[in-house]
Image (cartoon, rainbow, N blue to C red):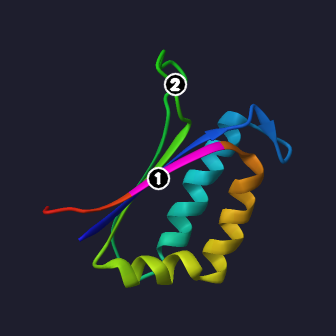
Amino acid sequence: MLRHLVMWKLKDFAEGNTKSENARLIKERLEALGSFFPGIRDMEVGVNQETSEYANFDAVLDISFDNYDEMVKYQTHPEHQKLAEWIGKVKEARSSVDYISEK
């Protein structure tokens, strides 16, 4: 199984929304997008707790695919591309890692 983890640090204000509002929108939009793709084994989207004193990133995606090809289908799908473009406008930074999980 291939796991794809992505974390975003968001701008304080972008696209007419606060950082908190955009983090919530990222969560909602990614979860809605996930229903389109049968190749997704599991997906969880988290938003950093505002009370956390160690707030390095604001949102995280933890998504699993059966294999690399399924991830590529997801990433190149027009709906994913549209969402990625919007996230690009509200993010300050992005980090990701892809790895093979034994679980």
Residue 59 visible, this orientation: yes
The residue beneath circle 1 is: 96
Which SS does the magenta portion mostly show? strand
Viewer-side residue, 2 vs 30: 2
Mark 2 is surrounded, within 10 Å at the Cα level, by few (under 14), some (14 to 19) or many (20 or more) other residues, namely: few
22 w.r.t. 49: above or below: below
Viewer-side residue, 56 vs 29: 56
Res 13 quadrant in image? top right
Res 46 quadrant in image? top left
* Quadrant of the snapshot with the C terminus: bottom left
The amino acid marked with disc number 2 is: Ala
Q: Position of residue 35 (x, y in %)?
A: 47, 75
In percent of the image, x 42 and y 76: which residue is there?
71
Q: Position of residue 95 (x, y in %)?
A: 51, 47
The residue beneath circle 2 is: 55
The amino acid marked with disc number 1 is: Ser
Viewer-side residue, 35 vs 83: 83
In percent of the image, x 13 and y 63: which residue is there?
102
Find residue 54 and name its label: none
